[in-house]
Amino acid sequence: MASEGVVKDVGEIHARLLDHRPVVQGEIKCFIREFEGKRNHREEDRLEAVLGHAQQMGQTIPTCTRLMEDNVTQVTANLSVATSMCEKISETEEKLAKADPLKDRREERKQEWDAFMSDQFGRSAEVDREHEILCDKIREQHRLKEELLKEGKVSLP
């Protein structure tokens, strides 16, 4: 009998300390009630905002349609005028491009300049080569004199 009492007491202690199901279920129910309450309120606010936007659009669309119909003829007229002006400008530009006597001269001068610059680059390269050759000769002469000085065949003046 004493062991039954001990087992019963251990079972009660176990239920109190380790069995949290009733507490957790209560917390879950409270959270669900709170979440649903807030969610319904948010959805209601959103639906009211959408309704307000829809009503505003219902008033704005007919006004926009009327304004568009009134101004379409004016816009098309302005576009046709702008198109004709662009065509005239394009025609005059083409005429000027064909009748430009200076263009040929500019092209000739450009070709002459390019030929001149390539000639100058060629001459510069030739001068650089000659300079390098002369520098090599001078180095060789100095090397020979150094050797002669080391051998003692030539004395310093």
Image (cartoon, rainbow, N blue to C red):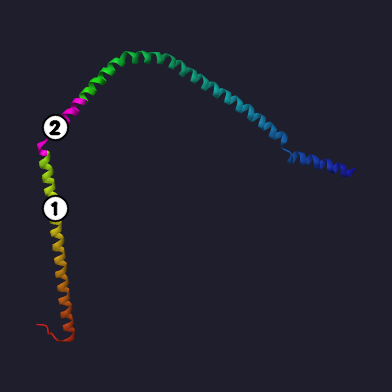
Which is more toward the observer, 56 or 88? 88
Give the residue drawn at x 24%, y 23%.
83
CA separation, marks 2 and 1?
31 Å
Give how far across and how far down residue 132 sits, in percent: 16, 67
Q: Quadrant of the C terminus?
A: bottom left
Which is more toward the observer, 54 or 9? 54
Give how far across and how far down residue 2 sits, in percent: 88, 44
Give the residue drawn at x 15%, y 63%.
128
**In the drawing, does residue 13 fall left or right of residue 27?**
right
Q: Secondary structure at mark 2?
A: helix
Between label 2 and label 1, give the one nearer the viewer. 2
Q: Quadrant of residue 7?
A: top right
The disc placed on residue 96 is 2
Are there few (<14), some (14-19), or many (20+) residues within 10 Å of tag 2?
Answer: few
Amino acid type assigned to the residue bearing label 2 in the image: Leu
Are there few (<14), some (14-19), or many (20+) residues within 10 Å of tag 1?
Answer: few
Q: Secondary structure at mark 1?
A: helix
Give the residue drawn at x 27%, y 16%.
74
Instruction: Assess whether residue 49 is covered by the magenta stretch.
Output: no
Amino acid type assigned to the residue bearing label 1 in the image: Met
Q: Is residue 52 above or below residue 103?
A: above
Name the residue beneath numbered marker 1. Answer: 117
Q: Which residues are magenta?
A: 87-102
Give the residue drawn at x 51%, y 22%.
46
Give how far across and how far down residue 67 sits, in percent: 34, 14
Residue at the far bottom: name it.
Answer: 152
Which is more toward the observer, 89 or 13? 89
The disc placed on residue 48 is none
Q: Earlier in the sequence, mark 2 or mark 1?
A: 2
